[in-house]
Image (spheres, grey):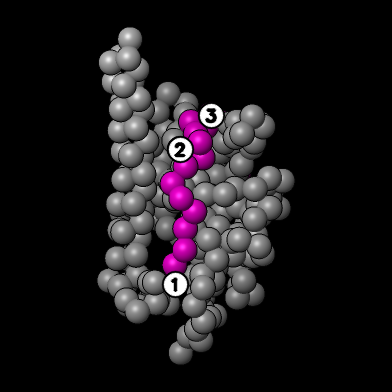
Amino acid sequence: MRILISILFLGFGAQAQTFSEKIAIHREHYKADFVSSERAPLKEPDLKHLQFYDADSTYSVNAKVTLLKGEKAFKMPTYAGTTADYIRYAKLNFELNGKPVQLTLYKNIALAANAAYRDYLFLPFTDQTNNKETYGGGRYIDLKSTAVIGGKIELDFNKAYNPYCAYSDGYRCPIPPEENDLQLEIKAGEKNYTGEKKKRN
């Protein structure tokens, strides 16, 4: 019996480590994208100021996807005072910490016109950690329509990231719509940037 318990314990430990490693790899790629992109607000020396919650598998859920039909394009405001054209693509329903949650998933119309990005979906949201532990303007999650399988999609808040506006002015970051304002704390993903906010030339 003691051997069986030890095997089970090691198995659960390996599973948890695998999830943490997966998130760690994702974050390394995330940081590398700043360095490789000319339009990114952060460079190599700034990356030490990026902060994240510890990986937590309870914030990775399978959400039910309800596709929205007949939706008209609308203009989503940005923090720069401009707008961008989006369409409401689907409703996501899931449970988080025992509470039912619903979010709206969007598609950027201009981006969808590019064959390389036609499957890209956009999930902006705000929650009760904003202006405390996380950026006050909310956070984003990137998804793809090809990830919808059997009417469900994996939604991992550990991959929630800050808009460029969290690091610098001069960017057109979409403002998360009110319907995606969560009345709970999402203690997963990226936290407040600890470096000095930059000014874009």
Question: Mark 2 against mark 3, which lies toward the viewer?
Answer: 2
In the image as oriented, which residue stretches furthest toward the front?
2
Q: Position of residue 79 (x, y in %)?
A: 62, 71
What residue type is disc 1 on?
His
Q: Position of residue 96 (x, y in %)?
A: 60, 34
Q: Secondary structure at mark 3?
A: strand
Q: Which residue is mark 2?
A: 57
Q: Classify residue 199 as left or right of residue 120.
A: right
Along the line of sight, the residue nearer the viewer: 18 or 74: 18
Relative vertical location of residue 169 with respect to residue 152 in this rendering, above or below: below
Q: Residue at x 31, y 26 (%)?
A: 11
Quadrant of image for the N terminus: top left
Query: Is mark 1 in CB contact (under 8 Å) with mark 2?
Result: no
Question: Mark 1 against mark 3, which lies toward the viewer?
Answer: 1
Q: Earlier in the sequence, mark 1 or mark 3?
A: 1
Q: CA distance from mark 2 to mark 3?
A: 18 Å
Q: Secondary structure at mark 2?
A: helix
In the image as oriented, which residue stretches furthest toward the bottom?
201
Q: Residue at x 57, y 49 (%)?
A: 187
Q: Position of residue 86 (x, y in %)?
A: 55, 55
Magenta residue check for 178: no
Q: Which residue is mark 1?
A: 49
Relative vertical location of residue 65 with respect to residue 56 in this rendering, above or below: above
Q: CA distance from mark 1 to mark 2?
A: 24 Å
Q: Earlier in the sequence, mark 2 or mark 3?
A: 2
Magenta stretch in the rendered image: 49-73
Q: CA distance from mark 1 to mark 3?
A: 35 Å
Q: Position of residue 47 (x, y in %)?
A: 38, 72
What residue type is disc 2 on?
Ser
Residue 68 visible, this orientation: no
Q: Earlier in the sequence, mark 1 or mark 2?
A: 1
Q: Which residue is mark 3?
A: 64
